[in-house]
Amino acid sequence: MDVLSGVLALGGAMLFGVGAIVLLLWSLIGALVIQLATKMVAGFKPGYGIAFLTALVAVIAGACVNYGLGMALSTMAFAWAICLVVAIAVEAAIIGFMIKNPQGTALGFAKGLLVTVIEIVIMTVLFVGVPLLLLSLLGGGAH
């Protein structure tokens, strides 16, 4: 194996490792948000384990669907909007199927959709709103 192949293999392994860490962290935080959103929508808090598994499955499925649709629709002007709607629907279906109330009944798509919308709002505030607020309070780096 020549040096370039070795460097490319190492770079690919590092990228995979970083992706796995981001996937894990996103799912860990997403599980907490799913618990909170489910409590708001359905009046109960699912266990952390099932919330984590649900977040993990939703992130992986969403990434696969977005990748596939992105490739198929790459020439369309509003492909991003179609991908967004499909990703929300897929996540809502996964949450609606995997999260069950204390009686063992699945939430269903409608409540899964409400949980998904609340999750999107909370995650957007956490990962966009809070950093922007901190930047503005700290002067945005302007000297």
Image (cartoon, grey):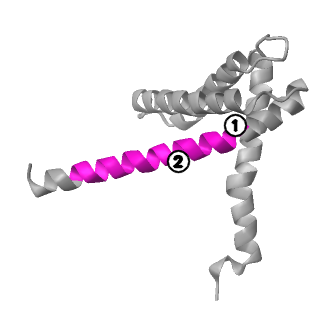
Q: Position of residue 10 (x, y in %)?
A: 26, 52
CA separation in Å, label 1 and label 2: 14 Å
Structural crowding at the residue carrying mark 2, measured as other residues with C-alpha within 10 Å and reported as few (<14), some (14–19) or many (≥20) = few
Question: Predominant secondary structure in magenta?
Answer: helix
Q: Residue at x 77, y 17 (%)?
A: 100
Looking at the rendering, in which quadrant would you find the C terminus?
bottom right
Quick one: SS at disc 1?
A: helix
Q: Residue at x 83, y 30 (%)?
A: 45
Q: Amino acid at mark 2?
A: Val
Q: Position of residue 133 (x, y in %)?
A: 76, 66
User: Is residue 99 visible to the viewer in this orientation of the structure?
Assistant: yes
User: Is residue 119 visible to the viewer in this orientation of the structure?
Assistant: no
Q: Position of residue 91 (x, y in %)?
A: 64, 27
Q: Which residue is mark 2?
A: 22
| Region in magenta | 8-31
Q: Amino acid at mark 1?
A: Ala
The circle drawn on residue 31 is 1
State the count of labels.
Answer: 2
Asked if residue 62 lies left or right of residue 2, the reply is right
